[in-house]
Image (cartoon, rainbow, N blue to C red):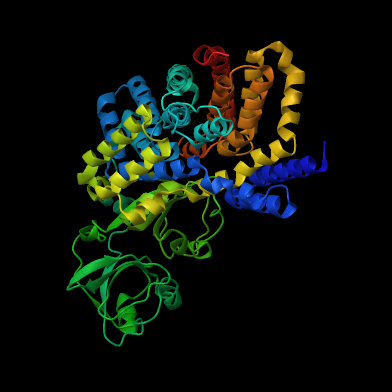
Amino acid sequence: MNGELIWVLCLLLGAIYLFVSNRVRMDVTALLVLILFVLSGTLTLPEALAGFSDPSVILIAALFVVGEGLVRTGIAYQVGDALVKVAGNSETRLLVLLMVAVAGLGAVMSSTGVVAIFIPVVLSVANRMGIPAGRLMMPLGFAGLISGMMTLVATPPNMVVNSELVRHGIPGFGFFSFSPMGLLILLLGIAYMLLVRGSLARDVQAGRNKGSRRSTLRDLIRDYRLTGRARRLAIRPGSPLIGHTLDALQLRARYGANVIGVERWRKFRRVMVSVSGISEFQARDVLLIDMADPEVDIRTFCREAMLEPMILRGEYFSDQAREVGLAEVSLIPESSLLGKSLRETAFRSQYGLSVVGIRRNGEALVGRLVDEPLQLGDRLLLVGNWSLIRQLHSHHRDFLLLGLPAEVDEMAPARSQAAYALLSLGIMVLLMVTDPVPNVVAALIACLLMGQFRCIDLESAYQSIHWPTLILIVGMLPFALALQKTGGVDLIVGGLMALVGEMGPRVMLASLFALTALTGLFISNTATAVLMAPIAIGAAQQMGVSPYPFAMTIAIAASAAFMTPVSSPVNTLVLGPGEYGFIDFVRIGVPFTLLVMAVSVLTIPWLFPF
């Protein structure tokens, strides 16, 4: 073992430590590794930055945009509503249809996004059917993970493995090469969940009386006791608010006045303007304000700030519902917000939304909430622009979006373009299947069609891309090259060959699956695929057999993150709503992972002969 290899292995262990400890963001860790490779001379600058030109990175970014187009046109939500109608009152039918729908949608869009969309649907239908949400949440999460096994573009690890094949001069997989295994594992998952669902929830709570409908704005206003708190106030000429930012004025701390939005004159009409901490007030602005503190004298506030009360129709800005929306989120165990107050977290600055209500132990807190420390289990009611509310799906590290009110269906900014979104998606899939152009070109064509048909605008397209995922891939790809240059891949392959090489290729497949699944417990499945793909291909070449079953095994194992609630963002999303503990995922996930491994080792060589 040479000095360069020891250095690379130390960097790898350091990166794994930072991934596990979560002291540094994963994308930042990946960039640090990339820089250290260049500074140490292990890789040249072009080699270290090669990930930025990798087609898989562009393809993943394009697929985020396509998925956002399906959300903005309301297609994803319509699938959820149709699922509930078809399932009726049958829990078995609902579980089967739920897993099929999630796996199908996740085959062409982000599995994390799909699961986040379906969580409020599942909560609603579980409440109507009088069953604990835990009986459906884990099947939902498992289906989200299995969706990554359905198509070539379903999850980043598939594309990473495919790119590694191409880099070795081997033709890559086709669009539906993963589908036979994905469908088989989906059937296995459905059967498994039907057997173990009775152990997924401890208590059955009656909930039939609330009905099947989704929460409305009126429901949220009632549950969080917002009635009577809304004010619509115009800024008079000479007001001390003019020319100052919201952060500088500290209206919430001084008067308990939380500015939700601003109506401003533009081109001879009033438009709604989103508010942030750096928003600067102008003369003639009309402020939409939530007065949370009942002890504040509104007349004194208006006099000191030189504000004039205006007519407000509807309950709690309901007449502004086309621009101002509400959403309910729940803090998750790993949230960085726990123990901090809203003031300390600078919530509005981070997310562009205001917290107007907190429910704790089923009761809405009253008074000034800005200095209330947040606790595990708290539910927060957020208010703000609908476009920002829709982006809450991407903030799954701190909280879970429990549901969007029924009115969100009417606020889909591109609902009328749903047919064009389906057309764009269909063209992309057709191009990927028939292969007249590279997959990345097919995805970019779909993005351009989405934009041309106004299914998505440029700003939403850029915001939909999960940049940390892309940076993580870009930063981890040089590891594979560094291990190859320093002999690390040959060393690991040699060790595997010495241990199980003489036992045959199936035993090697089982060993690679187990090693990949265990590595995925500590680092992301994308990073796991980056590290394991060259090892698998190297093992196949040393054994003199086809690399395809080995590459497919790595892709399947990387998506088989069923064993812990932190193995995948999908598991973390369902942890809170399902009221699961860590041991629940171990108890249910480990046996299923072993089943998937057995099925993979038996079936993959049949689909892709050695």
Q: Is residue 124 visible?
A: yes
Residue at the extreme bottom of the image, as rendered: 238
Residue placed at 56% from the left, 45% from the top? 51
Q: Which of 89 and 99 is in front in this view?
A: 99
Q: Quadrant of the N terminus?
A: top right
Q: Which of 312 and 45 is in front in this view?
A: 45
Give the x, y percent position of residue 205: 40, 31
Give the x, y percent position of residue 104: 37, 28
Q: In this view, does 369 lie to the left or right of 98?
A: right
Residue placed at 36% from the left, 34% from the top? 122
Q: Is residue 24 visible?
A: no
Q: Which of 501 and 515 is in front in this view?
A: 501
Q: In which quarter of the image is residue 422?
A: top left
- Above-or-below relation of 156 to 278: above
Q: Which of 525 and 271 is in front in this view?
A: 525
- Above-or-below relation of 384 to 304: above
Q: Is residue 201 left or right of residue 456?
A: right
Number of numbered tags placed on the structure image: 0
- Above-or-below relation of 275 to 365: below
Q: Quadrant of residue 513?
A: top right
Give the x, y percent position of residue 556: 53, 26
- Above-or-below relation of 582 to 372: above
Q: In which quarter of the image is the C terminus?
A: top right
Q: In this view, does 543 lie to the left or right of 337?
A: right
Give the x, y percent position of residue 420: 23, 41
